[in-house]
Image: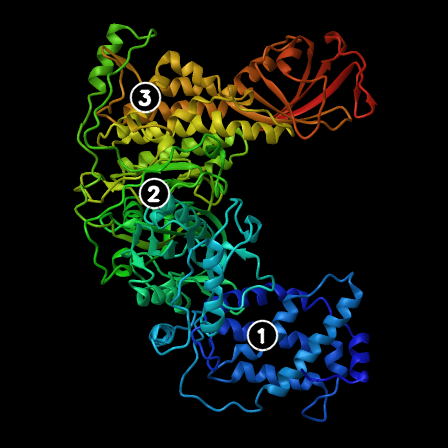
Amino acid sequence: MAGLSQEDRNIIKNHPLTSSVNHLQGVLQEAEKIYESRLISYDGAVDSLDQLYRGATSGLLSVLQKEGAACNLHSRIGDGKLESDLGHLVERLKKTKGIFKYDDYRPLVHLVIQRLPDNEIQDVDKWNIDIWKAVFNLIDNIPQSTPPTSIPPSYDSTPVKSTSSSQKGSEQTHTICRRVLDPDSDSNWAQFPDPPTQDNVLTWWFRLQEDLLSESRSTYYTTASKADLTGSQAERQVDLLLRARGGSPLQNKHDWTDILVVGELKKPKEKIRTKATLLQISCSVREVFAAQPTRRFVHAFTVCGTKMEAWVFDRAGPYSSVIIDVYADSRRFFQVLVGYTMMSDEELGLDTFIARDEWGNKSITVKGPGNSVEKVLQLGQMLSFQRAIVCRGTTCFLANNGQVEGVAKFSWVSDKRRPEAELLELAGQQNVQGVARIIGHSTITNIADMRRDLTFDDKRYDFKSAPPSTASSFHQSQPLTEPCRLDIRRKSSSRKRRSPDKGMQASKRSRSINQPSRDTQEENKLAFSIQSAHRPSLFDRNGEEPYDNRVLRCLVISPAGQPIYDYRSPLELLTALRDAIKAHQSLYLDGNILHRDISENNIIITDPGKADGHSGMLIDLDLAKEVGSRRSGARHQTGTMEFMAIEVLLNIDHTYRHDLESFFYVLIWQCARHGWEKLNELQGHGQDPPKDSMLREWYTGTYKKIATYKRGNMEAGGFEYLLQEFPPDFECIKHLCRTIRGVLFPYGKEGLIVGTPQVPQRLYDPIIKAGGRSSKGITKFACIIGDHQLKVFLYVNAKDLQRAFSSKRKHTCWTVWLKHHKMKCPFINDLSHLLPDIEFLELLFTGSHSYFFKYTLNLTGRNHGSKEMHGRKTPSSLNVKCMIT
């Protein structure tokens, strides 16, 4: 490094670096991370020309140019100050076309990234000196002029791809293999450890890497403990992992976002190609997909004794090579081992569709509706992703083009299904209300292209997933602690499964002790004549094809919203669900489109002011189908287990009624499962949900068992047991649930009817009407009690309140519940206990949608006496002012 005089050191000490440098750490870290994973050369002479690295570096130099030390330190190449040298360097970086050697700048970048806390004064002084040493060293080593080049750089914010990178990596792989296996070579790398214990194999592996793979793009690491892996709540170790060369300063720590390849080592060779071994490597692969949800595919390998098997996992499933014997096929073994370290981004399955600018901002380019002009949209935060391997891999980001805010969705959908963009355009042409509108779309790649030139034999694996745990279903989006299973199809907490087996038949209809009259039964039987009893159009096809060709598409829709399970009150839940059902009605009757995938993930809460008056909307038409169209021929239908209709579980064609049944299950799930979480948020302390929830049976066991159990829950008697799992704050929704159950599940001669009426309005109208009444009747308001500023929430039936105002009685008879918000008040638990002590005073005034009134709580009448509340005496009565909206 360049030396510093004592004068230089004094200047640096008197002019320490300002906080402006700190602001660049995030950008530089992002540039480093991307650069490490996208090197395209291996001899150190040519590095990436990506604008990201050039921009991040010039930004750093510009900040350093303005520092006080730069204005006072003398130039080493001229008569001026160092700031002039930095200015010339920045200008040259911006104007020069050609090769950008980012490696020359990395020592300086690393020093900035590694800044220590400001309270470590001695270390900070040393850090300042090291920074300026690195600056002088950089200027000394950078040529004063850059020769012109005929190779233009890329400035489209897309990572530069070298057309010869794969060929060069392949050539290097063959060179290393010849060096290792040449009989005349003095190396002994062909001698695999014996016995092949994990420690022996790791020692051999890293010695080979140190001697032969010093110029590879990527580097092998191992983990000594579960703490070595970050970026996931799941505690997991990986025997071998591959990440880009360079890495973070702490090489013993690895984030799942940086992992390129995973490997598993086992001593017994008999464990190769076993269920347990595949499941173990699959768990690691699933963590990679969870941390990198837009990843195309992931490489993995297992080495058991002297046997090796290479795997690739994509959204259609895993596939493997033949079993490689380390001794009998040593050349292939070394080709795989070395080849992983030389792979390009495309060969590793990394995402190359999302572009990044010099500051790390992400953007995508999509076509407008009807394949019109291209649009560039900026991506914001990630909203959701699917934590699974074999699935649609749905991943959503906020997106903005400066005019409208929307959501960009990436998903892998069967090529036999109609693209969602076409269905949304059709819905728009039919003036469907309450469904997201399309902003842009793009088709990126597909499984068939990624597996081109591969030959698959007839051997297939049949590894079935383990039963899901009860606890895992409580997690919302990105549940990171659920048990790992290879064949998990779920979004957020929802379990997605294939359609049931063909031979599955409907269970016998059960009777209830609370059956309606014979006339009602006959009427229901006529109205609910089942439309069809055929197998679903999306159904397993006896393995006619080796894999399901999924297509990766990007779809940008508007408006943005929040998933329905993020509701903030029962009122918000009901209004969103009501409007979503209206949207489904419009989609089906006006657009002639059946959704077929109603779940808590596909209903969003929207701002009526930004969504044409809709408080809730439907999204995700990936599985939707135009009514009357031929069967798609897709291999299977995925559905969210908790919300699948009984007949769908029993392999009967999907109808509009099944979607309405799924809406009903969504409502029950939000109350009985998520309602406890909302209650605890409201009260500021925890209450436990039922220990043995009936809802657990909605997603465990066989399809037939789940259908049978759901049917029992929908019986009049069984339904009341289900309602008992609602938390107290959701008592006001029970009547609505009973009403909808009666509409969807009437009784006939043979018991409960689960079939589909010929006339859709027979179900839509009463359900929407009931939801509207309930949302109007349930009202939330906040109270301030006296001067204690105790904020509470009260749910009350507005009609009962109006009757109370119209009467002259001193006491009301409302069925209401008073709950605390973040404050504990021991003498008020349930307003129903205080009803005799509520003294109605007067209605102050009314607004268009509001009541303002006050009343008095007579505390002494309930033997509360003079209680302490936060160190203050409680009066015998409290004046309460309320506003109800």
Find disc 3 in the rendering and name its residue.
744
Q: Nearer the viewer, residue 665 or 112?
A: 112
CA neighbours of label 3 inside 10 A, class few (<14), some (14 to 19), many (20+): many
- Could you say where residue 158 lies in the image, as x and y percent from the top left? 43, 69
Q: Which mark is residue 106?
A: 1
The first of marks 2 and 1 along the sequence is: 1
User: How many numbered marks does the figure carry?
Assistant: 3
Q: Which amino acid lies under the numbered mark 2 shown in the image of this protein?
A: Lys
Q: Residue at x 68, y 17 (%)?
A: 842
CA gap, disc 2 to disc 1? 45 Å
CA neighbours of label 2 inside 10 A, class few (<14), some (14 to 19), many (20+): few
Q: Residue at x 21, y 35 (%)?
A: 536
Residue 48 in the image: above or below residue 854? below
Q: Which amino acid lies under the numbered mark 3 shown in the image of this protein?
A: Leu
**SS for callout 1:** helix
Tell me, yes or no, if residue 46 can be seen here.
yes
Q: Image quarter for residue 17?
A: bottom right
Find disc 2 in the rendering and name its residue.
275
Q: Nearer the viewer, residue 42 or 211?
A: 211
